[in-house]
Amino acid sequence: MSSIDPKSLLPASIAEHVATLSLKGGRAIVVVDAAGLNEQQRDEIKRSIDTALSARDDVAEVRVVLTAERKQRRLIAIGSGKGGVGKSTLTANLAIALGRAGRRVGLVDADIYGPSQPVIFGNQGQKPVARDEKLVPVESAFGIPVLSMGHLVEPGRALAWRGPMAGNALSQLVDAHWGDIDTLLVDLPPGTGDVQLTMLQRFKPAGAVLVSTPQDLALIDAARAGQLFDQAEVPVIGLVENMAGYACPHCGEVSDPFGKGGVETAAERLELPFLGRIPLDLAIREGSDRGTPPAAGDDALARPFHDIAAKVDAWIGATS
Ligand SMILES: Nc1ncnc2c1ncn2[C@@H]1O[C@H](COP(=O)(O)OP(=O)(O)OP(=O)(O)O)[C@@H](O)[C@H]1O
């Protein structure tokens, strides 16, 4: 087999992507370094090589091998209309449940105004290192690498950040060394401000999950958040109702401090899928505070998170 200088047989613009070109018995094997190329560029290069080499008398067959053909990492944003409805809790547990379902999941805590993922994952105090001017995510006990503003700045320090400064800081979290992670969940700041819109436009997520409690006010805000995703042309995977149905630890009676079923009704009205309901349970808060999110276990509290993750997993499967 003879190795040939690609520039001698191919146009310079194509040859620069060729790692090796060999020719033996009329068969040309071309290895292309496809790192950094999108699907369309890869197809064009493949076609150009095929056309250029097939036209030669000494070539009967052309084989093009693309290396570093990495699947694009998909971002899934978790948003809410207002703070405190359980967006961070859902993001962490969804990440763990999707990981257990076989996805390679990472988590970006973009909630710069109240980063809670380091506490939920029990890795607060750890500082991410930088390599080649990019951050290396912090590992957690559940196989989910995490990057949070909480790992970078002292609690409360980012509160005064606005627009560009916040946007740039968030970019560093997303554009980090995520390695072979295929699904990146992004815990967005609550609300529908500029930071969220910039974030959505800059790193267009493949889809978004909206969390709300069942009260009317939270629902109105959630609908507004839905419009934000619409505006950014990000499909909404569905809505989740959190803090529905409180089981009294003494008598077991279930009450609904924030109402019940409101999110499902709102999902119907907005013509969006309803992904599931998470009960209001002290153990969920305690688990989050302790760094042991319920989805990492197998008991009844893990189930709603795994059921929601199964729907998100199916959505990913259907859209990739
Ligand atoms: N289903 C639940 N049952 C009991 N406590 C919950 C539940 N969901 C969330 N919590 C608790 O409610 C508080 C707020 O939740 P969380 O931080 O997830 O909300 P958030 O929407 O991300 O808020 P923020 O945007 O302010 O960060 C936390 O203390 C959390 O542990």
Image (cartoon, rainbow, N blue to C red):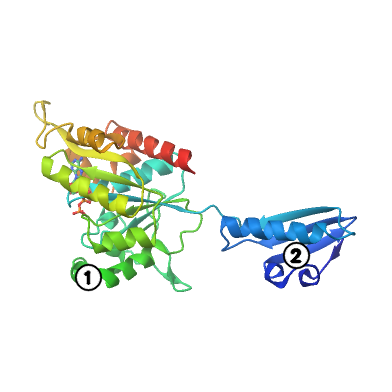
Q: Quadrant of residue 166?
A: bottom left
Q: Which mark is residue 7?
A: none
Count neighbours of disc 1 (C-alpha within 10 A) and say few if under 14, some if 14 to 19, many if 20 or more: some
**The one of 127 and 6 positioned closer to us in this rendering:** 6
What residue is pinned by disc 2? 20
Q: Is mark 1 within 8 Å of ligand 1?
A: no
Q: Residue at x 71, y 55 (%)?
A: 65
Q: Residue at x 21, y 45 (%)?
A: 223
Q: Residue 133: x and y, percent?
A: 44, 74
Determine whether, in the image, residue 42 is placed left or right of residue 176. Answer: right
Determine whether, in the image, residue 107 is placed left or right of residue 66. Answer: left
What residue is pinned by disc 1? 161
Q: Residue at x 75, y 65 (%)?
A: 20
Q: Residue 64: x and y, percent?
A: 73, 55
- Note whether residue 88 is visible: no
Q: Quadrant of residue 154?
A: bottom left
Count neighbours of disc 2 (C-alpha within 10 A) and say few if under 14, some if 14 to 19, many if 20 or more: some
Q: Amino acid at mark 1?
A: Trp
Local secondary structure at mark 1: loop
Q: Residue 127: x and y, percent?
A: 34, 67
**The one of 32 and 125 positioned closer to us in this rendering:** 32
Q: Quadrant of the N terminus?
A: bottom right
Q: CA distance from mark 2 to mark 1?
A: 49 Å
